[in-house]
Image (cartoon, rainbow, N blue to C red):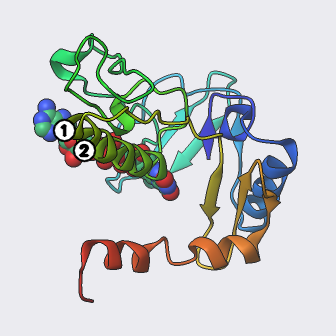
């Protein structure tokens, strides 16, 4: 695993969480090459098999059969935001400058991690606020979520962190998300296996 940042998760989350993930990755045989990016992108497209060698800026040669680009996601704010920027919203998730236009999810500039869980919370707040507008009631503010993570590493591994729970290891993480929330989303979307 190669990343130009000096530590896992860019140094986010407590040391104990990063140490737990580092240990599990090492046990899985994952070599961590941190703190130096590639001199040039790999010659093959991401996700397409094809053996290649590349060099990091620090001079390490990496040979691989496939690579995945786990970076570069960007919000598409369209006409509501400048290119590359997120849509500015009020605490009630109204698009700034608009009384009856709301935005939710990754595209907003709410100061919190961009996650499905927070997008879901935004949806609840906006649904309530649309109803409140219709009924002439006061709007509810979205409380930005503190940084947290549930990171499965295969069906039996992983680690989690939340400010109120602290760091959780493989067993607790498997209990929470060993199935990658497939069951939960099946129920939510009414999908029959
Ligand atoms: C690899 C990966 C793993 C993740 N794992 C987790 C996780 O474990 N837990 C978690 O909570 N979150 C996770 N996330 C984050 C989570 O996926 C996002 O926070 C969530 O999907 C945000 O939902 P959204 O509806 O705001 O945006 P999206 O899910 O990105 O939906 C936006 C939609 O808008 C469409 N769109 C874009 N431009 C236009 C346009 N001009 N016109 C019409 N449609 C358009 C896009 O195609 C897309 O379908 C992960 C993200 C990635 C990339």
Residue at mark 1: C-beta within 8 A of ligand 1: no
Q: Quadrant of ligand 1?
A: top left
Determine the residue positioned at 65% across, 48% down.
148
Q: Is residue 115 left or right of residue 162?
A: left
Q: Is residue 148 visible?
A: yes
- Identify the secondary structure beneath mark 2: helix
Residue at mark 2: C-beta within 8 A of ligand 1: no
Could you tell me residue 143's position as x and y percent? 55, 36
The image quarter in which residue 23 lies? bottom right
Total label count? 2
Q: Is residue 44 visible?
A: no
Circles 2 and 1, Cβ within 8 Å, touching? The answer is yes
**Quadrant location, the C terminus:** bottom left
The image quarter in which residue 52 lies? top left
Could you tell me residue 125's position as x and y percent? 38, 43
Q: Is residue 74 left or right of residue 54?
A: left
Could you tell me residue 3's position as x and y percent? 61, 35
Q: Which mark is residue 131?
A: 2
Asked whether 76 or 128 is in front, the reply is 128
Could you tell me residue 2's position as x and y percent? 61, 40
Question: How many residues crowd mark 2 within 10 Å: few (<14), some (14–19), many (20+)?
Answer: few
The image quarter in which residue 65 lies? bottom left
Asked if residue 37 is positioned above or below residue 189 in the image, the reply reads: above
Residue located beneath label 1 in the image:
134
Residue closest to the far front = 136
- Identify the secondary structure beneath mark 1: helix
């Amino acid at each position: 695993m190669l990343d130009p940042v000096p530590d896992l998760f860019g140094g986010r989350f407590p040391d104990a969480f990063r140490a737990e993930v580092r240990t599990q990755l090492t046990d899985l045989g994952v070599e961590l090459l941190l703190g130096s990016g590639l001199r040039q992108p790999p010659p093959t497209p991401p996700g397409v098999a094809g053996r290649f060698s590349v060099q990091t800026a620090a001079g390490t040669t990496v040979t691989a059969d496939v690579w995945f680009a786990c970076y570069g996601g960007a919000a598409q704010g369209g006409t509501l935001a400048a290119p590359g920027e997120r849509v500015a919203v009020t605490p009630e998730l109204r698009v700034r400058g608009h009384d009856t236009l709301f935005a939710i999810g990754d595209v907003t500039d709410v100061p919190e991690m961009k996650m499905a869980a927070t997008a879901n919370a935004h949806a609840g707040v906006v649904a309530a606020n649309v109803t409140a507008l219709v009924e002439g009631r006061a709007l509810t503010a979205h409380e930005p979520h503190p940084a947290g993570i549930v990171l499965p590493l295969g069906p039996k591994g992983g680690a989690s962190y939340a400010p109120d729970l602290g760091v959780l290891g493989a067993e607790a993480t498997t209990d929470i998300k060993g199935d990658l929330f497939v069951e939960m989303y099946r129920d939510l979307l009414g999908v029959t296996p």
